[in-house]
């Protein structure tokens, strides 16, 4: 755990110094990603799927094709499932997606009752939630699984439950029966 | 026999052979279907014991693996580390086995609904024996003998809850292979409970005084 944390931390520091010009940060692969383009064009409430996502372990920041990411290269360590009140490192979150987790991202300015509800979802097994800080989240709430994503205005929403039922621990993820515990609890802001 | 008649006989014999093979295939398929245990060859229903047990026990096992991994990082004691390795590897493998059933049955791997409905438990009640977030935090913060005793107490209760669930599935699941795995779980986890009580006694803790009902709800799940 401690070693995994330091690996992640060193990765972030190194990348901070090196910028995003790494030569192996090829994002999340091809497939539908190129045609779907910026996630701002994706209709709300529809499940969008992505194929042919790469899944290498890398020590650098990755320039993901989707915001938030739905898969691709990722950190050695995964993000332990649960609720986070600070943004997490996407490269760790993507590793949790690889393990079949659902990752709920939300705008940090959501009302407290929305955040409380999101926290209830994140209390479910194999589910994590974190705010998305940079103002680029394409909807107030976005649910991501490996290779699938749905944008929503708020929770609860039956489409959220249907998405979770279909994708959590599902074989659409590369390693759905690997755990979401025992990873890192590191956040971007420490 | 003229060549023409010989040809006709061959065709008839060939057709008869195809019928025999077809009948055999139908018999084998029917036999396999009957052997599945539900009698009609269909996958277990969404509300069946089999589906509910597979989903809930996969979740229950997941926390056992979490507790075992935590204690392995917090003690050098060979007995505890071996026990934790055994629990983690066994239960992680069983998680894959149960999720494999759900996939073959075409059932979702997890549910957003309340657990334990296949045992008719109240919808607001947690699965029996699960550790609470606070208890996991306590184990995470402990080291050495303290971590060992916290782990043993949590895992004994976890196993007791697991045995409660596995015994029910062993009695009531429709599929023979589900009943068999569940029965094996109940048996081996009871043996581990006995072993863990001994390990607690070695550490000066009398577990019997702290026995927790296997159906006691966890505080936060």
Image: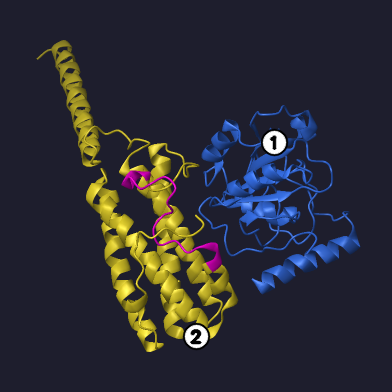
In this figure, which residue is indicated by the disc labeled 1? A31
Looking at the picture, does residue A147 appear above or below residue A19? Answer: above
Closer to the camera in the image, B179 or B22:
B179
Rendered view: B82 above or below A110: below
Q: Is B130 included in the stretch rendered in magenta?
A: yes
Colour seen for chain A: blue
Residue A57 part of the magenta segment: no
Q: Nearer the viewer, residue B145 or A14?
A: B145
Quarter of the image that includes the N terminus of chain B: top left
Q: Looking at this view, is B171 or B129 the one in front?
A: B129
| Image coords of residue B99 (percent x, y) | 43, 48
The chain under label 2 reads: B
Give residue A138's quadrant in the image. top right
Task: Locate residue A104, reporting x and y percent.
Answer: 66, 45
Q: Which residues are magenta?
A: B117-134
Residue at horizontal 57 percent and vertical 46 percent from the top: A173
Q: Nearer the viewer, residue B121 or B64?
A: B121
């Amino acid at each position: 755990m401690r070693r995994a944390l330091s690996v992640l931390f060193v990765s972030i520091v190194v990348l901070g110094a090196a910028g995003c010009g790494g030569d192996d940060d090829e994002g999340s692969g091809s497939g539908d990603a190129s045609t779907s383009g910026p996630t701002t064009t994706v209709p709300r409430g529809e499940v969008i799927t992505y194929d042919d996502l790469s899944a290498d372990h890398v020590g650098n920041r990755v320039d993901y094709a989707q915001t938030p990411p739905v898969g691709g290269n990722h950190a050695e360590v995964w993000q332990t499932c649960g609720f986070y009140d600070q943004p997490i490192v996407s490269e760790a979150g993507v590793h949790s997606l690889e393990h079949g987790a659902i990752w709920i991202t939300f705008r940090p300015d959501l009302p407290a009752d929305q955040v409380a509800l999101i926290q209830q979802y994140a209390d479910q097994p194999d589910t994590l939630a974190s705010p998305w800080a940079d103002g680029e989240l394409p909807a107030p709430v976005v649910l991501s699984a490996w290779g699938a994503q749905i944008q929503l205005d708020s929770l609860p929403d039956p489409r959220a439950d249907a998405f979770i039922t279909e994708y959590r621990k599902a074989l659409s993820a590369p390693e759905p029966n690997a755990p979401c515990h025992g990873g890192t609890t590191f956040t971007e802001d420490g | 026999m003229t060549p023409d008649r010989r040809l006709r006989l061959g065709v008839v014999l060939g057709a008869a052979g195809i019928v025999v093979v077809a009948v055999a295939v139908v018999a084998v398929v029917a036999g396999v279907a009957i052997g599945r245990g539900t009698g009609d060859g269909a996958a277990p229903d969404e509300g069946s014991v089999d589906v509910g047990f597979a989903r809930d026990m996969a979740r229950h096992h997941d926390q056992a693996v979490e507790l075992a991994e935590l204690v392995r990082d917090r003690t050098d004691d060979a007995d505890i580390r071996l026990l934790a390795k055994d629990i983690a590897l066994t239960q992680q493998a069983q998680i894959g086995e149960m999720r494999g059933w759900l996939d073959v049955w075409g059932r979702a791997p997890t549910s957003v609904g309340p657990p334990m409905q296949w045992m008719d438990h109240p919808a607001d009640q947690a699965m029996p024996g699960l550790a609470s977030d606070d208890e996991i935090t306590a184990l995470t913060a402990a080291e050495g003998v303290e971590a060992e005793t916290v782990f043993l107490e949590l895992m004994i209760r976890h196993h007791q809850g697991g045995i409660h669930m596995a015994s029910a599935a062993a009695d009531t699941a429709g599929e023979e292979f589900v009943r068999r795995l569940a029965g094996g779980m109940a048996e081996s986890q009871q043996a581990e409970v006995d072993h863990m009580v001994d390990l607690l006694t070695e550490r000066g803790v009398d577990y019997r005084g702290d026995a927790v009902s296997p159906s006691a709800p966890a505080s936060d799940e």
